[in-house]
Amino acid sequence: MRLDWELARRGYRRYAAYPAATIAGLFTNTVFGFMKGYILLALYQHRNVVGGYDASDTITYTWLTQGLIATIYIWGWQELALRIRSGDIAADLARPVDPLRAGLAFDLGRGLYHAMYRGAPPIIVGAFVFDLTAPSNPLVWLAFAVSVVLAICVCFAWRFLYNTSAFWLLHYRGAAIMAMIVSSLFSGFIIPVPFFPGWLKAIAYATPFPSMVQVPIDVFVGKIEGLGVLQALVVQAAWLAGLLLVCRGAFAAGTRRLVIQGG
């Protein structure tokens, strides 16, 4: 545990070293929050409910997604792929710590920093301007916090998995871009999954992606209640365990391939 704590601290400190990038990202997330919010509110000009969401739920969803962009880090992480391409992965394999475990601990530290400085501020701005839905029960806040932590872990596992494509592909960026597009759509980041037609919603919930965005938001706005909250957290944990197993298998297969090639 001490090792994981130290790695998490370094993940936090690495991103804390670039306050200008944090401010720029915070400004961008806030501006897009207003743009996305007003676009989605236009849906309620002639109706009161869409997919079980009223206008207050939808605008809350908008600002929560803006707060979760950097927190779960759904886009742009290609560090493992770059280390594979450069050969630096050999140094990771020589260290007495599993790269998957080290990466997850580091990412949790990063997630804490982004939750504090790029996650909470846009939501606070949105709460000043709009009538957001907020839980009144402290247990719901606790469940939301746990759900966000699980979302960070699930998202990391997915990012780690598609980064391992660099073991086999010369142009890994194509696979990474496709993976980010799919996860952005089916996670509920672009529009809420309940807005999808029935067949597409069924496909989305058969994937791990709603566990990255939609599940924490549904817990927060009260679309998941009672024992359903516990079930949702168990589903998130199950997806995390499954993805980590697949990550470990893919990474092991990739490293064996490197040895065969003499890398």
Image (cartoon, rainbow, N blue to C red):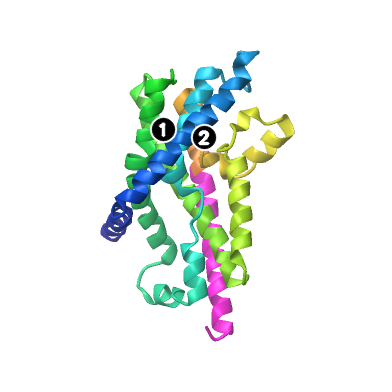
Residue 18, quarter of picture: bottom left
**What is the residue that sits farthest to the bottom in this orientation?**
262
Say whether residue 218 is visible: no
Residue located 65% across and 13% down the image: 46
- Element at label 1: helix
- For marks 2 and 1 on the same chain, the one whose residue lies earlier in the sequence: 1
- In this rendering, is residue 249 above or below 216? below
- In this rendering, is residue 204 above or below 3? above
Given the image, on which type of amino acid does mark 1 rest? Phe
Q: Position of residue 131 (x, y in %)?
A: 43, 17
Whether the magenta-drawn stretch holds residue 155 is answered as no
- Asked if the residue under mark 1 is in contact with the one under mark 2, i.e. CB atoms within 8 Å, the reply is no
Residue located 45% across and 49% down the image: 153
Whether the magenta-drawn stretch holds residue 252 is answered as yes
Q: Position of residue 183 (x, y in %)?
A: 59, 46
Q: Position of residue 147 (x, y in %)?
A: 44, 37
Residue 189, quarter of picture: top right
Q: Which residues are magenta?
A: 237-263
Q: Residues within 10 Å of mark 2 (few under 14, many from 20)?
A: many
Looking at the image, which is closer to me, 254 or 193? Answer: 193
* In the displayed structure image, the side of residue 231 where residue 165 appears, left or right: right
- In this rendering, is residue 129 above or below 163? above
The numbered dot on residue 171 is none
Residue located 43% across and 35% down the image: 30
The numbered dot on residue 215 is 2
Residue located 35% across and 34% down the image: 121
